[in-house]
């Protein structure tokens, strides 16, 4: 009689699967997917700052996003390529975060080392709550500017109009400002964690790289925060 135990039937876990199962592997995945979004946010802000140059500039940037790569790529294909990278990166980032948090909770000591435990989990706890807030923001943001369902007067080919229409309402501006602060804090902690994960926290040269990344996160936050305020105050509009 065959007596196959679950252990005998289980396939050996190798390569990417074992990396994904390990804590360090998940941290690597979080670092890489976080960097992808960091890069996207820099490009996104660069494009959004066209709002200060007026409707023609911002709308031309929006059109350019759709025709870039022609004639090798068709209309909107570049945008879809970016989405094909960004969407899975986002999902995997959240997935790894949830698994790392539950693993961290499960291994948390009850009585001993309370101080160290409190310090180490404060950052990760704010990261997870900040992350949930950013997720809610992103859903609203897509409904606002991509699908137009929550925008007061959405016009598919007029990004400038949509941005101005949305940020003329102060509750929306407050929500965006809080979300931009959450994104900034998330990036700031994410950058430090990434350097820790990749083992780049020792060599002297990396201080420069880390400082550049931190300055980018601060500029990104301030740049993003300025746009809703500029519309609400009438500087843009
Ligand atoms: C005040 C700051 C921001 C402004 C004014 C802004 C503006 C916009 C606009 C106008 C669009 C539509 C672009 C188009 O249809 O061509 C858009 C799309 C998008 N934004 Fe933002 N954005 C801001 C911050 C952010 C942040 C912080 C994130 C991420 C956390 C983000 C993620 C996205 C994504 C994923 C899209 C969809 C891109 C696509 O169509 O695939 N945005 N944003």
Image: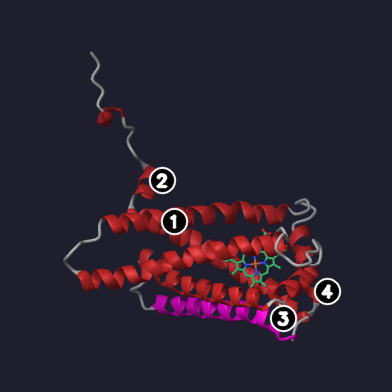
Percent across and percent down for residue 27 are: 39, 59
Q: Closer to the observer: label 4 or label 2?
A: 4
Q: Quadrant of ligand 1?
A: bottom right
Q: CA distance from mark 4 to mark 1?
A: 39 Å
Which type of secondary structure does the marked residue at label 2 adopt? helix
Quarter of the image holding residue 228? bottom right
Question: Tag 4 or tag 3, which sits nearer the N-term?
Answer: 4
Task: Please give the name of the residue rendered at 48% of the width and 64% of the height, measured from the top-left corner.
Answer: 131
Q: Closer to the observer: label 2 or label 3?
A: 3
Please give the residue where the numbered disc 1 appears in the rendered image.
Answer: 29
Q: CA distance from mark 1 to mark 2?
A: 11 Å
Please give the residue where the numbered disc 2 appears in the rendered image.
Answer: 16
Q: CA distance from mark 3 to mark 1?
A: 37 Å
Q: Closer to the observer: label 3 or label 1?
A: 3
Which type of secondary structure does the marked residue at label 4 adopt? helix
Q: Closer to the observer: label 4 or label 1?
A: 4
Question: Tag 2 or tag 4, which sits nearer the N-term?
Answer: 2
Task: Please give the name of the residue rendered at 39% of the width and 44% of the height, measured from the top-left corner.
Answer: 17
Q: Is residue 111 magenta?
A: no
Left or right relative to 83: residue 5: left
Task: Please give the name of the residue rendered at 66% of the width and 82% of the height, measured from the top-left corner.
Answer: 229
Quadrant location, the N terminus? top left
Q: CA distance from mark 3 to mark 4?
A: 16 Å
Find residue 231 and name its label: 3
Task: Please give the name of the residue rendered at 30% of the width and 58% of the height, measured from the top-left corner.
Answer: 105
Percent across and percent down for residue 79 are: 69, 56
Above/below status of 43 relative to 218 = above
């Amino acid at each position: 009689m065959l007596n196959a135990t679950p252990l005998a039937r289980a396939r050996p876990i190798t390569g990417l699967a074992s990396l994904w199962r390990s804590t360090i592997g998940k941290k690597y995945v979080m670092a890489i997917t976080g960097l992808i979004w960091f890069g996207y946010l820099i490009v996104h802000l660069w494009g959004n700052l066209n709002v200060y140059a007026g409707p023609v500039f911002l709308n031309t940037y929006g059109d350019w996003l759709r025709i870039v790569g022609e004639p090798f790529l068709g209309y909107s294909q570049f945008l879809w390529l970016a989405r094909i990278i960004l969407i899975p990166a986002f999902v995997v980032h959240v997935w790894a975060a949830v698994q790392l948090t539950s693993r961290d909770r499960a291994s948390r000591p009850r009585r001993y080392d309370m101080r160290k435990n409190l310090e180490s989990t404060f950052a990760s706890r704010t990261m997870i709550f900040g992350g949930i807030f950013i997720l809610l923001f992103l859903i609203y943001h897509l409904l606002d500017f991509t699908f137009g369902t929550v925008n007061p007067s959405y016009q598919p080919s007029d990004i400038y109009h949509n941005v101005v229409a949305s940020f003329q309402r102060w509750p929306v501006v407050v929500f965006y400002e809080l979300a931009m602060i959450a994104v900034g804090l998330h990036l700031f902690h994410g950058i430090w964690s990434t350097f820790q994960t990749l083992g780049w926290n020792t060599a002297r040269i990396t201080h420069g790289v880390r400082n550049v990344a931190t300055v980018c996160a601060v500029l990104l936050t301030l740049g993003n925060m300025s746009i809703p305020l500029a519309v609400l105050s009438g500087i843009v509009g």
